[in-house]
Amino acid sequence: MIRALSMIAILTLLAGASLADDQVRSQIRFESTQLPMSPDPQVGCEVGNPNDPYWTYGNWIMGGETYAYLVNPNTEGCSCGAGFKLDRVTMMMQFGPEDVPVTFDAYAGLAEAVWDDQRGAYVPGADYCTSPTWSITANAAGLYEIYVDMNDGCACAATTEPYFITFHLPYGFTWWPSALEDNDPQTGISYYNSGGGWADLVGDFGWWGKNIMRADVTCCSAPVSEEGSTWGGVKSLWR
């Protein structure tokens, strides 16, 4: 029985390795214009990456990973005054014919921006708040701007500091969707964590552009962080 189970395990590993070998990762010029699933009309204002996709990184998104993008509503034209509230987070993903149909889980959040002296840039810290986990289905091949509604999962945040919006894909994909990039490769903005810590997609992984992530926010007047508590002390209020 042990020998039989061992053989099954070996065959499973070999099958997984073969599947991975068939999914070649490469960056190419983005050509698709199909948008089978887009967010509803925007409300409030939008932060994050305003650029259109220019490059695609084939078979990049394996799942079991988190993406983060640096945002600062007041410097991105929101003019929110004292505070802002995160309403929706989106990330572009491209599914090939072999990737669909597929149903997967995703959730989003707002995270601390921590200054890293060695990098000379902000890096993502812990999530202050997260959305519910949503089950999302992609039935057709094409470009998707996957969106996650926060459903009041985040309180009013102060505009006096930068943050990261985060997009979590907690479980692995059998067939790997492609990631989308702009044509403006700046470091210190787009990050990726597959369990080993945060890495800069441009500086550490050599992406040719920044990840296409953005978020809808609305202005608010009573930010939690200005009510006499530290962020760490109010995290429990946001869950």
Image: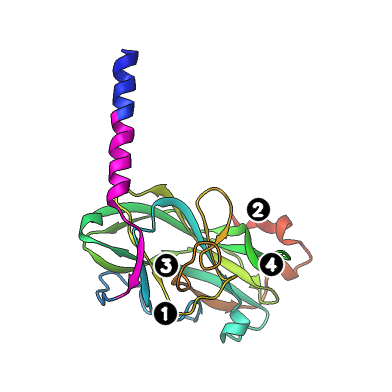
Q: Using the image, tell me which numbered label, if any, was put on residue 236.
A: 2
Give the residue number, with chain letter if any, for mark 3.
91
- Dot 2 surroundings within 10 Å: few (below 14), some, or many (20 or more)? few
**Is 233 within the magenta?**
no
Q: Are marks 3 and 2 in contact (CB under 8 Å)?
A: no
Q: Position of residue 28 (x, y in %)?
A: 33, 70
Q: Main secondary structure of the magenta part?
A: helix
Residue beneath label 4, please?
A: 224
Q: Is residue 163 left or right of residue 3?
A: right
Horizontally, is 6 left or right of 47 in the view?
left
Q: Circles 3 and 1: CB distance less than 8 Å?
A: no
Point out the stretch of residues depicted in magenta. 11-30
Residue at x 55%, y 67% (from the top left corner): 203
Query: Which residue is at the front of the view, 174 or 218?
Result: 174
Q: Please name the amino acid that badge 1 sits on.
A: Gln
**CA–CA distance between discs 3 and 2?**
26 Å
